[in-house]
Amino acid sequence: MEQEKLSKVIEAAKLYYLLDYNQNEISQILGVSRPTVSRFLQLAKSEGIVEISIKDPTENVENLSFQLEQKFNLKKAVVSSVPQFEDHIIKNYLGEKTAEYLHEIVKDNDIIGVTWGTTLYHVAIELKQKFVRDVKVVQLKGGVSHSETNTYASEILYLFGKAFNTTPLHLPLPAIVDQVVVKQAMEADRHIGKILELGKQANIALFTNGYVNPDSLLFQLGYFTKSDLETLNGKAVGDICSRFFDKEGNICNESLNDRTLGINLEDLKQKEYSILVAGGPNKIEGIYGALKGRFANVLITDQFTAQFLLDKKE
C-alpha cells in the first residue's frame, strides 16, 4: 500500500475507533467520499492495523464458575459479574442471581430454610412468585436481638412465603443465649422443637457468612460477652448461622456454639441444596473456611471474590 493511502487509512481508523467520529465526519476531514472512508476502515481491519476483540463477561464468569466447582467440589457455582468490588453493590447483584437460582430449583413439597441479614434481604426482595404446592419456609436460626438493629428476619420470611405461596415459620428466639440450660429449656418446648426439626429436615438451606468485625450485623445485636469476643478474635474467620469457624472450617468456640440456637453446621452438609450467598473483601476468608468445612454445596458470589478464592493456596 502506498504511503499516502496508508496514512489516510491509519488516520481514518484513529478518528473512527479512538475518537468516535462517524464516517461522514471523517470524509469531510480527509477530503474523500464516505464510501472511501468505509473502504479505509475495512482495509485497516484486513491489514491488521486495527484488531477488534470482544470481551464477553458471561464467558469469564462461566469459566470462574467451572473452576470453583472443580476446586471446592461444589454441586453448583454461580458467579455474578459486578461493576465494583463494594459490599452494597455486590449484595444487589447477588440478590438478583440467587433469586433467579431459587426460582429454577424450588419445586412442590420442598422445605426451604433461610437465615437473616442484609444479604438475604436483598435475595428476598428480588424473588418472583412461583406457583408451587406444599412448600414450607422455615427460619434456621434465632433472630431476636438485644438492640434496635434490624436483622430483616420478619421481612425475609414474609417475602419468601409470598413468593412460594406458603405461611413461613418463625423462630422467635435470640441467636445466642447466656447459658446452655436456657437453650435446652427453649429447645424442650414442643413448638420450638417442631420448628427446629423442620429446619433440620429442610432440603434447601440458604445462608450467608458473617465476618468477625464490630461493624458486622451479628456483632451489633448485643449477644457477646467480652470473653466471647476474646476467643473469636484472631482465630475465627467467619460465622454461618451464628456458629463461628476457623480457616479450616472447624468450630472455634465450643462453649459459644453450645449456647447458639438454630441449625448445626454439620446438618448443612446433609442438604440437597446448601446455598452460600456471599461476596466482597470482608467475606473472602470466611467463604474459604466455609468451603473447606464443606458447609455449602452451592456458592453464589461475584467475579472478584471468585478469583480471590481460586488464587488462594490450599
Image (cartoon, rainbow, N blue to C red):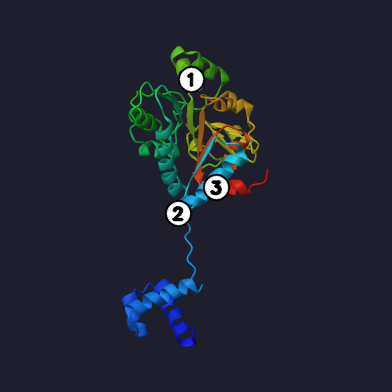
Q: Is residue 162 above or below residue 279?
A: above
Q: Nearer the viewer, mark 3 or mark 1?
A: 3
Q: Residues within 10 Å of mark 3 (few under 14, many from 20)?
A: many
Q: Secondary structure at mark 2?
A: loop
Query: Label 1's element?
Result: helix
Residue under circle 2?
83
Task: Identify which amino acid the numbered label 3 is placed on.
Answer: Leu
Q: Is residue 167 left or right of residue 110?
A: left
Q: Earlier in the sequence, mark 3 or mark 2?
A: 3
Using residue 251 as the reference point, say whether residue 38 is left or right of it: left
Q: Position of residue 256 (x, y in %)?
A: 59, 28
Q: As shown in the figure, which amino acid type bears the numbered disc 2?
A: Pro
* Residue 196 disc label: 1
**45 versus 237 height, above or below:** below
- Secondary structure under badge 3? helix
Q: Which mark is residue 79?
A: none
Please state which of residues 105 and 228 is positioned toward the viewer in this rendering: 105
Report x, y in % for residue 79. Answer: 50, 45
**Residue under the image location 34 percent in, 36 percent down:** 128
Sequence-first disc among 2 and 1: 2
The residue that label 3 is drawn on is 64
